[in-house]
């Protein structure tokens, strides 16, 4: 009777009032947005402190330490030295973390997290005040990809379904770089100066975007024959090459020869039997690619020479069945260690795993008291021993020395 909306006495229940319209959730407008946190009622001085910190650490040039690969013993020692404490766990966004970026500063740990509702949380981990994190809403949909600009870390670029934005802290705005009718999935910079980017679309196409040209349309849209493109990533040395990962396809393309149709890959990375969640080049030479696939395997490919098919170097059995409530795993390389990558895990106790490109498990980060959830999205600091894991309730966990 309850299901039929009838009271036990036989009297029909009153009709439900009409649901309020979309005004409840105002849509984020197009164009530049002021960098004002969502809880505007809060203390604006604390927000100011956070943004000033971001600006200050972006002006300091990081020591250009040559990217080098340490020997395994030293690297494992550095992994063992990184621990998680209660102070370094914080709920930064409201919903499931879908992307993260870490500022390259060597003095302050400053992390950005995007969630499935379009929120971006900024957290100064060194700030001991209760208010160390603030939330902004520059997007309407899931924030699928974020990077601090390697050229100017006062810029935080974030991508959601319909728009690529640049949070510019020097002007305190979220500018709009590119807007699209088709859903956007991921992006990466094509040049060191971060002025151009390759952007993947959920429907399989890729586009080239130039931040210097006026307007918010892309320079070129190319059909690469994919059903969907989940991640795109540019080769660290030969910037003309980028890798795209989609339903079961993982291919490398040359951006110089992209045209609207009929694009042929330079190389194909075969062997995936189900959908691929991500594919990334190794950080120093690009001689390796790691992929995460729904067939419960992590695969490492040897991309030293880009022939038409690239061989598999190692395969790791790994439960990638995250289900519908968790963000899918993405295996990311440690930017300081050419041959090691980090990935979330379904294993208990909850942990974040580090593998060598040979497939050997090197280290598991866990803490029975402070980490009780799956960290699907992880990010590693480019020069310091810092790892941040994000979970599906918007909480970030920072492992550090």
Image: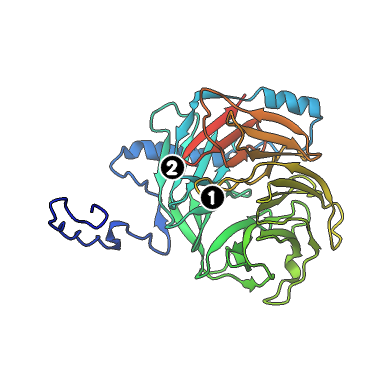
Q: Quick check: 337 above or below 160? A: above
Q: Residue at x 75, y 71 (%)?
A: 257
For the question of whether residue 109 can be seen, the reply is yes
Label at residue 155: 1
Measured Cα–Cα span from mark 2 to mark 1: 20 Å
In the rendered view, how is the structure colored? Answer: rainbow
Residue 26 in the image: state x and y as whole percent: 32, 59
Instruction: Work out whether residue 210 or residue 122 is closer to the camera in this orientation and state it.
Output: 122
For the question of whether residue 108 can be seen, the reply is no
SS for callout 1: strand
User: Counting residues from the N terminus, which is met first, the one under dot 2 or under dot 1?
Assistant: 2
Asked if the residues shown at circle 2 and circle 1 are in contact, with their CB atoms under 8 angstroms apart, the answer is no
SS for callout 2: loop
Q: Which residue is mark 2?
A: 93
Report the side of 77 relative to 12 (left or right).
Answer: right
Q: Residue at x 70, y 25 (%)?
A: 78
Q: Residue at x 83, y 56 (%)?
A: 310
Q: Quadrant of the C terminus?
A: top right
Q: Residues within 10 Å of mark 1 (few under 14, many from 20)?
A: many
Instruction: Work out whether residue 229 or residue 175 is closer to the camera in this orientation and state it.
Output: 229
Where residue 129 sits, quadrant-wise, is top left
Q: Quick check: 369 above or below 358? A: above
Report the side of 347 relative to 258 (left or right).
Answer: left
Q: Residue at x 68, y 23 (%)?
A: 80
Residue 252 in the image: state x and y as whole percent: 76, 61
């Amino acid at each position: 009777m309850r299901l039929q909306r009838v009271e036990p006495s036989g009297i029909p229940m009153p009709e439900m009032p009409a649901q309020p319209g979309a005004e409840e959730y105002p849509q984020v407008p197009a164009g530049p947005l002021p960098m004002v946190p969502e809880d505007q009622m809060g203390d604006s001085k604390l927000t100011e402190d956070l943004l000033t910190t971001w600006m200050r650490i972006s002006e300091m040039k990081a020591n250009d330490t040559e990217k080098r690969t340490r020997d395994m013993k030293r690297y494992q020692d550095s992994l063992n030295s990184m621990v998680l404490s209660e102070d370094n766990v914080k709920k930064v966004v409201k919903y499931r973390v879908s992307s993260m970026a870490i500022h390259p500063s060597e003095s302050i740990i400053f992390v950005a997290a995007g969630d499935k509702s379009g929120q971006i949380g900024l957290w100064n981990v060194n700030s001991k005040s209760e208010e160390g994190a603030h939330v902004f809403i520059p997007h309407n949909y899931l924030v699928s990809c974020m990077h601090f600009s390697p050229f100017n870390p006062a810029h935080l670029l974030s991508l959601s379904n319909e728009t690529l934005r640049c949070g510019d802290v020097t002007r305190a705005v979220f500018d709009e770089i590119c807007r699209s009718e088709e859903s956007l999935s991921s992006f990466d910079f094509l040049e060191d100066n971060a002025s151009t980017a390759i952007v993947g679309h959920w429907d399989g196409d890729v586009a080239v975007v130039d931040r210097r040209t006026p307007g918010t349309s892309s320079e070129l849209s190319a059909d690469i024959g994919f059903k969907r493109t989940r991640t795109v990533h540019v080769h660290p040395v030969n910037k003309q090459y980028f890798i795209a990962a989609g339903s079961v396809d993982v291919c490398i393309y040359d951006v110089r020869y992209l045209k609207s149709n009929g694009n042929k890959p330079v190389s194909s990375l075969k062997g995936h039997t189900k959908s691929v969640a991500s594919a990334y080049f190794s950080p120093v030479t690009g001689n390796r690619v790691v992929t995460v696939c729904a067939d419960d395997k992590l695969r490492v490919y040897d991309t030293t020479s880009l022939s038409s098919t690239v061989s598999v170097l190692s395969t790791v059995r790994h439960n990638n069945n995250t289900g519908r409530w968790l963000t899918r795993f993405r295996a990311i390389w440690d930017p300081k260690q050419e041959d090691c990558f980090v990935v979330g895990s379904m294993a208990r106790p909850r942990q974040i795993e580090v593998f060598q490109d040979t497939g050997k498990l090197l280290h598991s980060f866990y803490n029975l008291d402070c980490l009780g959830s799956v960290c699907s999205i992880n990010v590693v600091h480019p020069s310091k021993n810092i790892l941040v894991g994000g979970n599906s309730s918007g909480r970030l966990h920072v492992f550090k020395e």
